[in-house]
Amino acid sequence: MLSVIGPPMKINLGLSDDVCQTAGQVLNFLLADEYMLYATTHDYHWNVTGPDFHGLHLLFEAQYEEIHESLDDIAERIRALGVGARGNWADLTKSLRLSAERGIGLSPELMLSGLLGLHEKMIVQLRTDATRAATLGDLGTADFITGLLRQHEKAAWMIRSHLEVVEQSPT
């Protein structure tokens, strides 16, 4: 068994410690928001009802699975910067910048519009976060966040397209 003796190794990414800490903090806020979106999407997957149950159940499942993969990627990016990734639920909830309705008893249309709103808020926040990382000179984090931005744009487009179908169908 390998044991580490002494202080942690110094990370050399061509960025100052302050830049790594700041970028790590930005990513920890993002991690909290992504966890909330993951939990909300999973909640809606479990609690959706109605004539389009099957389609929405599958849509929500595909989206929460993609978000789940992103969570690990975000935490690993934080750790690559030499910062601790906040994985404790109490810490995550203190860092949330988003909020959502619970799924129990919520109509499918409200679930869809709620998720669309969350993805759009994430898109706006991710643009700010990517710009901040680029301004810090952390192009790796800026690029990473831009990739997440594209994922949320696609998710929002899919939900928006589904809502348009729902709005056009006869009542």
Image (cartoon, helix red, strand yellow):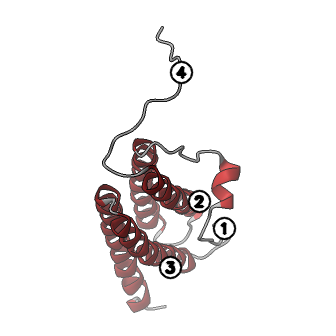
The picture places residue 2, in percent across and down from the top left corner, at 46, 11
Q: Amino acid at mark 1?
A: Arg
Label 1, secondary structure: give it. loop
- Return the disc, 1 or 3, that comes first in the chain's sequence: 1
- Return the disc, 2 or 1, that comes first in the chain's sequence: 2
Q: Which residue is mark 3?
A: 117
- Return the disc, 1 or 4, that comes first in the chain's sequence: 4
CA distance for labels 2 and 1:
7 Å
Disc ID at residue 102: 1
Observer-nearest of 54 and 160 = 160
10, above or below 113, in the image: above
The picture places residue 59, in percent across and down from the top left corner, at 40, 63
Q: Which residue is mark 2?
A: 43
Observer-nearest of 82 and 169 = 82
Disc ID at residue 6: 4
Observer-nearest of 13 and 116 = 13
- Return the disc, 4 or 3, that comes first in the chain's sequence: 4
Label 2: how many Cα within 10 Å (few below 14, some 14–19, many 20+): some
Q: Residue at x 67, y 58 (%)?
A: 93
- Return the disc, 4 or 2, that comes first in the chain's sequence: 4
Q: Amino acid at mark 2?
A: Asp
* Residues at marks 3 and 2 touching, judged by CB atoms closer than 8 Å: no
Mark nearer the viewer, 4 or 2: 4
Label 3, secondary structure: give it. helix
* Residues at marks 2 and 1 touching, judged by CB atoms closer than 8 Å: yes
CA distance for labels 1 and 3:
14 Å
The picture places residue 118, in percent across and down from the top left corner, at 51, 74
Disc ID at residue 74: none
| Residue 110, picture quadrant | bottom right
Q: Amino acid at mark 4?
A: Gly
